[in-house]
Image (spheres, rainbow, N blue to C red):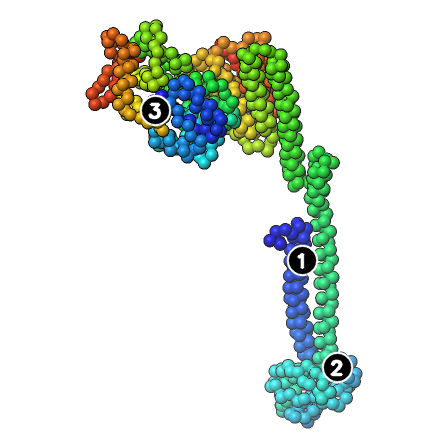
């Protein structure tokens, strides 16, 4: 899951980025509104976290322009001013939730996960497809009740596949959503990751949890259990 | 630019002076003209009357000789050098001269024709100017023979000019005098009329230097509205300043407790996990204290100078926002808001008041929230109900107790309701906590609305 973070305060930006990365989320962090608007318009994000008081272009304007450009990913606003008038203004502009500074990181993480779930039609905090469960807040993955040990990128890939269980996802889409924009990427690596995931989730090759659709991409076949 | 900076009394005085000068000037001009015209007309008429006097005094005998009665009705004709002269001419010959002429003579205007008259100015050798009326008469004697005469009556022009000059002088004296008196009176009237404004300025200065708190109330009705509003503004500012000062002092004091707790923990506890835990707790406490006091300081409070805001509009906007945030909870919100529910209040304060209450309702409800706004004559009642678990009776008092500071409040209460209580207090309203028919809490707020 790839997140756009727009926050001008350097310490907060770095802390939040680190914490989110610790949760195996892909984070692109930028410091001002113009840069944020550019990133948000150019790359496919699953969620954006936007501070309201930004240099160059205010958070409200960034949100309005992203929405006007047809971007539908959920937006969480961060604001130092807890006035209701500001919150209402932000939500009216097109944001989906708000968080007043200072906040606990757990709170931010919970809100991000909730918005991501909501956007892809999930209700429960823990994602479950067939026998596989994934807990975004603890990053624990279980298969038939047994913990599965995944590398960071395997986890990111499985998280995204599970959020969109049942949908066909192209290799490019998968790459876009698990890599930060400045990272080297090779779409062939996806094949390797998929193969490893299959081995870890279905070592006996019975359930075939991820199917390959030639020329189109991949699909998680395990049924969603809300 | 200069005109704009002119004081009110100078403006008025300036304008009045110009108007008065113009008015008096044109009056003088037209009076003068009218006088001169009537003086001229009167003079001609007088000369003509003299002609008639002479005609009645004259006699024609059969031989055509003209004789004049000795005693003429007008004594000036008999007084030498009186300035009024008469002579009767026949052809080019002087037939008769009044005694006043002393035998001098005067030019001989032509015979104007029977019953015709000629007005002319003749100048004597001595330089004296005369206005002369020549009147032609044709006399018939008993035989039916006609004789032509010209009757000349002359009046000294100098006398007339002097008279005119005298009049003009008098006119200017009177008008000038009146003008000066009027201006003086005007200046006095202005001073008297503008005195309340000066008094306001003096009182405002006194307020500025701290010698007064408000303006006095005995001003003329035109100013009363203004001074009343200034007083309201001053009161409003005063209470705001006090709230600001109080919240600043409260903030400083209330921050000391968590700081002391944390320092104590740092100094006494050997366990790093404990210190971290206490640090977190006290930081949270500090954060909410800052939030709360900031909110309190930002509260505008009641003032009749604020424009009316629509409660319906604010509630709808907040509900739209909450519906977005609490989407997954699928809350059914029913509202019953009177169309004309407007209140003279600060928009930000109303957002804060309603936002906190509505968010609480959304947070603690099961599925239903009910908002009612009733606008009565001078009170607006807002009811916010939910179908949650409600608030236990023993806690209700604590939650809505007025003026209760956040640092003395029950842990975990959040600052939302403390802010709500403060705003209601700033608007001199009432809040009551009841149990809703829906089963949960029912906050009833009454705000005065004048």
Gap in angstroms between the C-alphas marked 2 and 3:
128 Å
Query: Of tags 3 and 1, which is closer to the observer?
Result: 3
Give the side of residue B211 with respect to residue B261, left or right.
right
Disc 1: host chain: B
Image coordinates of residue A146 in percent, x first then y, are 34, 6
Give the side of residue A48 with respect to residue B295, left or right.
left
Image coordinates of residue A48 in percent, x first then y, are 40, 25
Residue at image mark 3: A179
> Do tag 1 and tag 2 residues touch (Cβ < 8 Å)?
no
Which residue is painted at 79% across and 83% down in the image? B79
Please give the label number shown on residue B69: none
Image coordinates of residue B20 in percent, x first then y, are 67, 58
Which residue is painted at 71% across and 66% down in the image? B172
Q: Quadrant of the C terminus of chain A?
A: top left
Residue at image mark 1: B17
Which of the two residues, B361 or A182, is positioned nearer the viewer here? A182
Where disc 3 sits, the SS reads loop
Gap in angstroms between the C-alphas marked 1 and 2:
45 Å
Gap in angstroms between the C-alphas marked 3 and 1:
86 Å
Residue A151 visible = yes
């Amino acid at each position: 899951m790839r997140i756009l973070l727009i926050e001008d305060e350097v310490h907060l930006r770095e802390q939040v980025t680190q914490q989110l990365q610790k949760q195996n989320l892909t984070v692109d962090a930028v410091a001002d509104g113009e840069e944020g608007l550019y990133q948000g318009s150019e790359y496919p994000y699953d969620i954006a976290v936007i501070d309201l008081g930004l240099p160059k272009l205010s958070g409200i304007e960034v949100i309005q322009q992203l929405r006007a450009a047809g971007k539908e990913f959920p937006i969480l606003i961060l604001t130092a001013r807890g006035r209701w008038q500001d919150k209402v203004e932000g939500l009216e502009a097109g944001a989906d939730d708000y968080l007043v500074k200072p906040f606990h990181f757990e709170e931010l993480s919970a809100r991000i996960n909730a918005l991501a779930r909501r956007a892809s039609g999930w209700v429960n905090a823990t994602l479950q497809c067939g026998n596989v469960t994934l807990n975004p807040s603890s990053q624990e993955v279980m298969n038939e009740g047994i913990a599965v040990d995944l590398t960071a990128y395997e986890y990111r890939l499985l998280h995204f596949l599970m959020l969109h269980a049942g949908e066909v996802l192209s290799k490019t889409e998968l790459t876009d959503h698990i890599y930060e924009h400045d990272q080297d990427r090779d779409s062939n690596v996806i094949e390797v990751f998929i193969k490893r995931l299959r081995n870890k989730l279905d070592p006996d090759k019975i359930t075939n949890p991820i199917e390959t659709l030639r020329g189109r991409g991949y699909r998680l076949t395990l049924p969603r259990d809300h | 630019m200069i005109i704009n900076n002119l004081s009110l009394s100078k403006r008025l005085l300036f304008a009045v002076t110009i108007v008065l000068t113009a008015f008096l000037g044109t009056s003088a001009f037209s009076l003068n003209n009218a006088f001169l015209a009537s003086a001229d007309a009167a003079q001609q008429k007088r000369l003509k009357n003299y002609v008639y006097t002479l005609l009645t005094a004259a006699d024609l005998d059969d031989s055509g000789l003209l004789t004049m009665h000795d005693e003429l009705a007008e004594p000036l004709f008999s007084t030498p050098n009186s300035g009024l002269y008469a002579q009767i001419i026949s052809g080019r010959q002087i037939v008769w001269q009044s005694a006043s002429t002393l035998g001098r003579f005067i030019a001989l205007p032509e015979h104007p024709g029977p019953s015709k008259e000629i007005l002319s100015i003749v100048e004597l050798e001595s330089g004296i100017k005369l206005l002369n009326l020549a009147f032609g008469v044709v006399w018939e004697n008993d035989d039916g023979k006609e004789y032509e005469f010209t009757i000349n009556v002359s009046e000294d022009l100098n006398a007339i000019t002097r008279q005119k000059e005298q009049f003009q002088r008098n006119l200017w004296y009177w008008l000038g005098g009146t003008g000066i008196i009027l201006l003086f009176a005007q200046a006095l009237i202005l001073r008297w009329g503008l005195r309340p404004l000066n008094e306001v300025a003096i009182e405002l200065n006194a307020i500025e230097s701290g010698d007064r708190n408000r303006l006095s109330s005995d001003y003329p009705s035109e100013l009363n509205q203004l001074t009343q509003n200034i007083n309201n503004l001053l009161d409003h500012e005063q209470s705001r300043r006090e709230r600001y000062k109080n919240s600043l002092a409260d903030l400083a004091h209330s921050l000391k407790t968590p700081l002391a707790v944390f320092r104590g923990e740092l100094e006494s506890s050997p366990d790093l996990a404990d210190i971290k835990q206490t640090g977190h707790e006290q930081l949270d406490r500090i954060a909410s204290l800052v939030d709360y006091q900031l909110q309190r300081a930002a509260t505008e409070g009641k003032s009749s100078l604020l424009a009316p805001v629509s409660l319906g509009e604010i509630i709808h906007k907040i509900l739209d926002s909450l519906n977005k945030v609490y989407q997954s909870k699928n809350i059914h919100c029913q509202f019953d808001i009177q169309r004309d529910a407007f209140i003279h209040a600060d928009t930000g304060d109303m957002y804060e008041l309603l936002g906190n209450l509505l968010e609480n309702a959304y947070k603690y409800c099961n599925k239903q929230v009910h908002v009612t706004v009733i606008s009565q004559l001078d009170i607006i009642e807002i009811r916010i109900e939910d179908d949650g678990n409600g608030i236990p009776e023993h806690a209700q008092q604590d939650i809505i107790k007025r003026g209760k500071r956040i640092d003395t409040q029950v842990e975990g209460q959040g600052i939302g309701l403390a802010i709500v209580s403060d705003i209601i207090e700033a608007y001199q309203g009432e809040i009551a906590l009841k149990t809703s028919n829906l089963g949960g809490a029912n906050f009833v707020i009454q705000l005065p609305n004048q």
